[in-house]
Amino acid sequence: MTDAISVIGVGKVFDAAGVTALTDIELTVAAGEFVSLIGPSGCGKSTLLRILADLEQPSSGSVAVFGKSTRQARLDQDYGIAFQQAGLLDWRTVRANIELPLQLHKVSKSERRARSTELLELVGLTDFADRFPTELSGGMQQRVAIARALARTPALLLMDEPFGALDEMTRERMQNDLLRIVEETSAAVVFVTHSIPEAVYLSDRVVVMSARPGRIVDVLEMDKTIAEGTDRRETATFFRSVTAVRESLHGRLTA
């Protein structure tokens, strides 16, 4: 099976500012894999995500998304994007926001309706289909944004701190929702976060990046096996993984 993402020798220099944001990035993400990027502010996590999304161009190296150029993957709608701010249109209902990508691609009204109904059920917002974003909590708005990102049934989700502005209880609930959605859709995920526990809880692998210029300095496998009915956040394995990521991150910052 073709990898979701293949990054080879990628660097990024912002010439106008004279800033080297990324250097020699090598990363592979398998289909269906959940990978988090973590590192200090300014290390290039979001820049790397924007390169994967064809919103920035690398200065060197190459990127493939499902074996295609990032531009072709974008045109083929192979991925969906969710950012820290939900970015919903206040004058459109929840259903209309979810249907927006389908409308832009001239999907028929009946097909849009069927897909939005399916997605509303997936994210638990069926009863809010006709509400407007201003009537929703922050967590509910993020669920709408995730549903919109899934509208075209992408095989990859690119997520830039989508839960960063939420309170801790809502954030944990959204993490659980995201894992359920990913399991049901089999999408691969690249997830940017500043939270070590969040990265550990969500990920198959955690990628640790250095301070600018951003480099990948460690990749840690996460053990996600737990007994049925157990909250993984309360297991010894989880705390060991949090410690391992913290030591890798802080060790690199002080080295």
Image: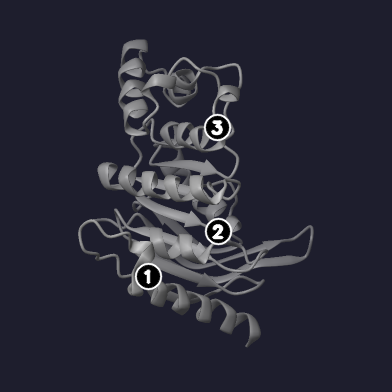
Q: Amino acid at mark 1?
A: Phe
In the rendered image of this protein, does residue 254 appear above or below residue 220?
Answer: below
Image quarter in which the C terminus is found: bottom right
Disc 1 crowd rating (10 Å Cα; few below 14, some 14-19, many 20+) is many
Colouring style:
one colour
Gap in Å between the C-alphas at discs 3 and 2?
A: 30 Å
Q: Which is more toward the observer, 56 or 131?
A: 131
- As drawn, is 4 to the left or to the right of 248? left
Q: Residue at x 79, y 57 (%)?
A: 16
* Residue ranking furthest to the top: 109
Mark 3 or 2: in front is: 3
Secondary structure category for the residue under label 3: loop
The residue that appears at 58% across and 45% down in the rendered structure is 84
Lower sequence index among marks 3 and 2: 2
Indicate the position of residue 193 as horizontal and vertical percent values: 54, 58
Q: x%, y% of residue 102? A: 41, 23
Mark number for residue 238?
A: 1
- Residue extending farthest to the right is 17
What type is the residue that disc 3 sits on? Ser
In this rendering, the answer to whether 253 lies above or below 86 is below
**CA–CA distance in space, label 1 to label 3:** 29 Å
**Are there few (<14), some (14-19), or many (20+) residues within 10 Å of tag 3?**
few
Determine contact: label 3, label 2, CB under 8 Å: no
> What SS does tag 2 mark?
helix
Q: Quadrant of the N terminus?
A: bottom left
Which residue is disc 3 drawn over?
A: 137
Q: Can you tell which quarter of the image residue 30 is in?
A: bottom left
Q: CA distance from mark 1 to mark 2?
A: 27 Å
Residue 50 screen position, x and y as percent: 56, 51
Q: Which residue is mark 2?
A: 48
